[in-house]
Image (cartoon, rainbow, N blue to C red):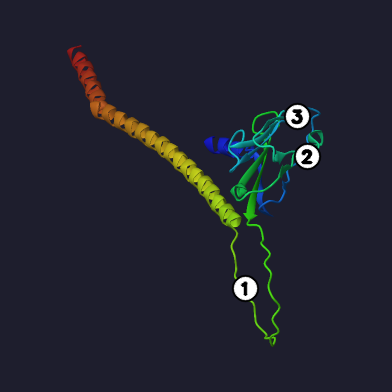
């Protein structure tokens, strides 16, 4: 029963797409895409925030709409330039700063329980490139191999860490449910065994309290025979 309830909750869990990584340079304008298709003809509120999408709302809200208009804007450089009624709620960040690096959450707040659509994105901000004048030197060309360094994206590492945490949580819950079911079955078996043992003990006590019922009946029958014979002799 509890296991079925757990599976039901997982099926109703809010939909969250995997985090995509976007790169921008300091001073540039970056577009973080987010959109939805709604089956109902009603405004759908959305929010943009920093960090991983929580269970409800958005952490460190940057923008908030009522489905038709922006009702909260943390800074003017955060804008929604798409048509909200058509489901285009992509976030435009102007004059990107290094502090803008990190995770972003776009939450589409569909009506109903556990119906929200969540989109997680990662933004990597690189320093602006500086151009310097290099004088041309006439040298004999040499064949050199450029050093290639493999760089692991922090966003990929974060995604792997989040996946590991989710797997650990699901595995722990499953183990807990198995232990609970095992405990319930063990309790039922123990009660059944105790009940059977009690019945056997009661049967044993009853049989010991009346060990020779047939012997007493025979003795009574013999006494009746002797009485009849004595009456015959007297006659």
Q: Residue at x 60, y 68 (%)?
A: 150
Position of residue 205 measured from the top left corner of the image (x, y, whole percent)? 26, 29
Left or right of 173 in this view: 59: right
Question: Which mark sits nearer the N-terminus, 2 or 1?
Answer: 2
Q: Is residue 62 visible?
A: yes
Camera sees residue 109: no
Secondary structure found at label 1 = loop
Assign the N terminus to one quadrant of the image.
Answer: top right
Image coordinates of residue 200 in percent, x first then y, are 33, 33
Tag 2 near tag 3, CB within 8 Å: no
Q: Quadrant of residue 13?
A: top right
The residue under label 1 is 148
Direction bottom: furthest residue: 140
Which residue in the protein does label 3 denote?
Answer: 69
The C terminus appears in which quarter of the rendering?
A: top left
Mark 2 or mark 3: whose residue is earlier in sequence = 3
The quadrant holding residue 105 is: top right
Residue 223 x, y percent position in the rendering: 20, 20
Badge 2 is on which residue?
Answer: 81
Within 10 angstroms of label 2, few (less than 14), some, or many (20 or more) residues? few
- Cα separation, mark 3 vs mark 1, equals 48 Å
């Amino acid at each position: 029963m509890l296991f079925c309830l757990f599976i039901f909750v997982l099926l109703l869990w809010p939909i969250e797409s995997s985090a995509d990584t976007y790169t921008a340079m300091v001073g540039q304008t970056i577009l973080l895409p987010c959109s939805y298709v709604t089956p109902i003809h009603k405004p759908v509120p959305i929010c943009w925030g920093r960090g991983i999408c929580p269970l409800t709302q958005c952490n460190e809200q940057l923008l908030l709409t009522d489905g038709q208009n922006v009702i909260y804007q943390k800074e003017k450089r955060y804008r929604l330039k798409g048509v909200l009624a058509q489901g285009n709620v992509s976030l435009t960040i102007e004059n990107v700063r290094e502090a803008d690096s990190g995770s972003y959450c776009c939450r589409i707040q569909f009506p109903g329980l556990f119906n929200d659509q969540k989109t997680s994105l990662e933004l990597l901000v690189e320093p602006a490139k500086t151009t310097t004048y290099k004088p041309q030197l006439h040298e004999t060309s040499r064949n050199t191999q450029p050093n290639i360094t493999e760089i692991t994206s922090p966003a990929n590492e974060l995604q792997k860490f989040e996946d590991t945490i989710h797997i650990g949580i699901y595995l722990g819950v499953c183990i807990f449910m198995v232990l609970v079911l095992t405990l319930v079955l063990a309790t039922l078996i123990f009660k059944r065994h105790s009940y059977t043992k009690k019945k056997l003990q009661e049967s044993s006590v009853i049989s010991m309290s009346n060990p020779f019922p047939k012997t007493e009946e025979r003795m009574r029958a013999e006494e009746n025979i002797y009485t009849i014979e004595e009456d015959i002799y007297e006659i």
